Amino acid sequence: MNKQSWKRTWVITGLLILVLLGTVAVGLFSNIGGRTASASDSITTSDTLNKNFVDVNGLLKMPSKVTTMYSTVNINSEDGGATFLDGILYTFSDYYNGQSGVLMQAWDQETGKKLWSLGIQDWSISLASDGKHVFFYDQGVLSCLDKRTGAIVWKGVPQVASPFLFGANRNITAHINEKTHAADMLYVIGWEYESIPPQIQYEGKWITPINKQAIAQKVRNPGIWILDANTGKLLSRLDLPTLTFSSYGRSGELLCDGNTLYAGIPESTESEYPAQKSSLIAFDLRTKKLLWKKSVDGECSQLVKQGNKLIFLRNSEWIDVWQVGTSSNLVKRLWTHDSTAGQWNSFAVDSSHLYFPCGDGKLIVFDLDTGKEAWRQQFSSYKTGEIDDPTKLRDLYPIMTLTMTRDLLYVQDGGGLVAGFDPASGKRLWSKRISTVIFGQIFYRNWFILRPVDKGFLVLFDNGRVDLWK
């Protein structure tokens, strides 16, 4: 695959699916007070932790008109995106005005009013919220902001001894106290790494290393770091000595569901991506003990919890559905399936079914308990030019995006069409073309992000316009 083709593939893959990432030697929890937990994800109903689920009533009839329209900011097609969380729309776009990095802006989801903006370094940060605050990790720094004003509540990193620095992956998970309904602890997969000068001396000259693997860098204390959500101070650490670090900046996934912390931890003798093995583990936050651990082939790309089912995405190619409980004898893998040229990062799940799109325009639905196919739908292809010859048209099946509500499955076909499906029967209730996405060699235009609201949906276009459809 040539460079242009590679770039185009990953640009389209990364953006059309937005809104939308050995043996374990387990250390003991320490210095954690007797706190009671509840579900930690803001998009949570009961014991569900599912980022592709929005707790609203779906639009069961074809939308008739745009009832509200407002503008945010132009969302860059390569380095931007959007996140909807706790009534706030967070947009990410290139940070210019003489500054490098990314501009994160917060907007009131209902009124369209701009609340605040902040310059950050990494547009792919993972946000967590407790309804009052937003938490994130950005290029070595943990932050807690007031979600309405953007005021910094605290900012910093855990203190480690020189010459080591603190590092972490982007996945940060909040633990919500059921009495105060506020976050009291944060969990992040972190480590300490030896500080290295930006230049090294070679043949009498100071040069900047190109290949960081050429330098043997010491790493210590890898594990799950537990922080006070009110201050950012380190409370404890759960040691994971065999944690593997990938050059892609991802080293495991975390979910905090009530009294249980779930983790998909990559483990391998080689620090390559993807890891050959992972551990799927669960910790009891009340007793501070390991509940169970299972070995899984491949590296965890995503974790979703639906009732007593844990969906484990492996290398974005295989998906496992596990039944989980409080002890090892209650935990078993119910079924597994490969992607069949699918697009696993956009899958959706509810209490009955697992929904996923395939690369040939098929939407296939499995029974969540058995893995048997329940129904499928076929979407049409689009005509687009070849990379080397734009005049030579070919069929393209863009990457679909799925979003589940209480009673409706929203499907974006990737080319500008939105459809609503009855999740039980597979009946298509309506289809609506919102725009026509134009695919170029290394770009595309007119793409958008969809966010369901009660009996309607918001559409955020790449030019920053937001429409509310009812």
Image: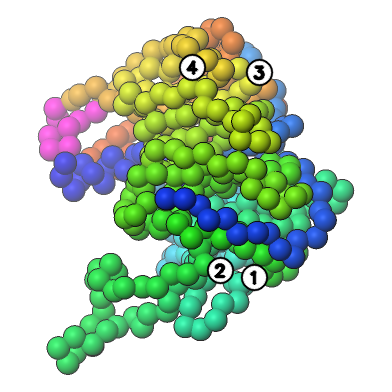
Disc 1: CA contacts within 10 A as few (<14), some (14-19) or many (>=20)? some
Q: CA distance from mark 1 to mark 2?
A: 7 Å
Residue type highlighted by circle 1: Lys
Say above or below: 316 vs 200.
above
Whichever of labels 3 and 1 marks the residue nearer the N terminus, that label is 1
| Above or below: residue 3 compared with residue 215 | above
Instruction: Measure how far apart labels 3 and 4 are at the Cα level.
Output: 21 Å
Magenta stretch: dominant secondary structure:
loop
The structure residue drawn at horizontal position 49% and vertical position 17%, both measured from the top left corner, is 371
Query: On the image, numbered disc 1 is attached to which residue?
Result: 155
Given contact means CB atoms under 8 Å apart, are the residues at marks 1 and 2 in contact? yes
Q: Which residue is mark 3?
A: 407
In the picture, measured across the screen, residue 64 lies left or right of residue 347, that is: right
Q: Give the label on residue 371, or none.
A: 4
**Closer-to-camera residue (91/47):** 47
Residue 61, picture quadrant? top right
Q: Secondary structure at mark 1?
A: strand
User: At 56% from the left edge and 77% from the top edge, which residue is drawn?
Assistant: 160
- Identified at 33% across, 50% down, the residue is 273
- What segment carries the magenta color? 384-392
Q: CA distance from mark 4 to mark 1?
A: 45 Å
Q: Name the amino acid, label 2.
A: Val
| Residue 203 position in % (x across, y down) | 14, 88
Q: Earlier in the sequence, mark 2 or mark 3?
A: 2
Q: Nearer the viewer, mark 2 or mark 3?
A: 2
Label 3 vs label 4, nearer the camera: 4
Q: Position of residue 150 (x, y in %)?
A: 68, 62
What's the residue type where badge 3 is placed?
Asp
- Nearer the N terminus, badge 2 or badge 4? 2
